[in-house]
Image (cartoon, rainbow, N blue to C red):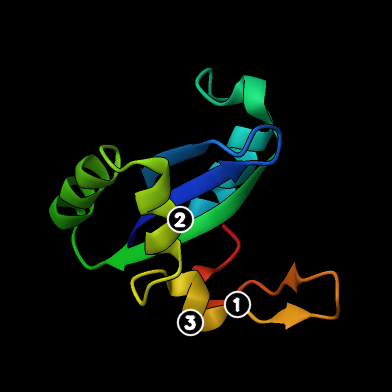
Amino acid sequence: MFYVYIIRSEKDGSFYKGFSLQPLTRLQQHNNKESKYTAAKIPWQLFHIEIFDNKTTALKREIVLKKYSHQQIVALSKSFKNQLQHDIKYQGLGCSPVIPNWLGTG
């Protein structure tokens, strides 16, 4: 599986869009300041994710998403395309996400 993800900075609400085979590992790398583009805006949270069967389609989608405005990303995150909308359930009032099985941990 190939993943296109959007993460949101808790520091300033900005978004970063990327591609990964292991999105949770990649999120961890962003939060560990292993990316110069995102290091100054940690912590990051997974905001949107889409799954693709092939790399070419995923990379093309990433290019499209990189052109999206802030408002377009917010709207997209509420759409059926966001796998997190389908699969993450929230516990209690704190809304702690439960990571779905299909996303894995590594």
The picture places residue 55, in percent across and down from the top left corner, at 20, 53
Quadrant in which residue 8 is drawn: top right
Element type at mark 1 = loop
Q: CA distance from mark 3 to mark 2?
A: 16 Å
Estimate the x, y position of residue 36 in percent, counting from the top left.
Answer: 53, 17
Asked if the residue at tag 1 contacts the one at tag 3, i.e. Cβ–Cβ closer than 8 Å, the answer is no
Which amino acid type is marked by label 3? His
Q: Residue at x 48, y 82 (%)?
A: 86
Quick one: which residue is furthest to the right in this view?
A: 93
Among numbered discs 3 and 2, the one appearing first in the sequence: 2
Near mark 1 (Cα within 10 A), the count class, few <14, some 14-19 or many ≥20, is some
Give SS at disc 3: helix
Residue 71 seen in the current view: yes
| Residue matched to label 3 | 86
Q: Earlier in the sequence, mark 1 or mark 2?
A: 2
Q: Which mark is residue 88?
A: 1
Residue located beneath label 2 in the image: 74
Is 34 drawn above or below residue 78 in the view shown?
A: above
Q: Residue at x 56, y 57 (%)?
A: 106
Amino acid under disc 1 = Ile
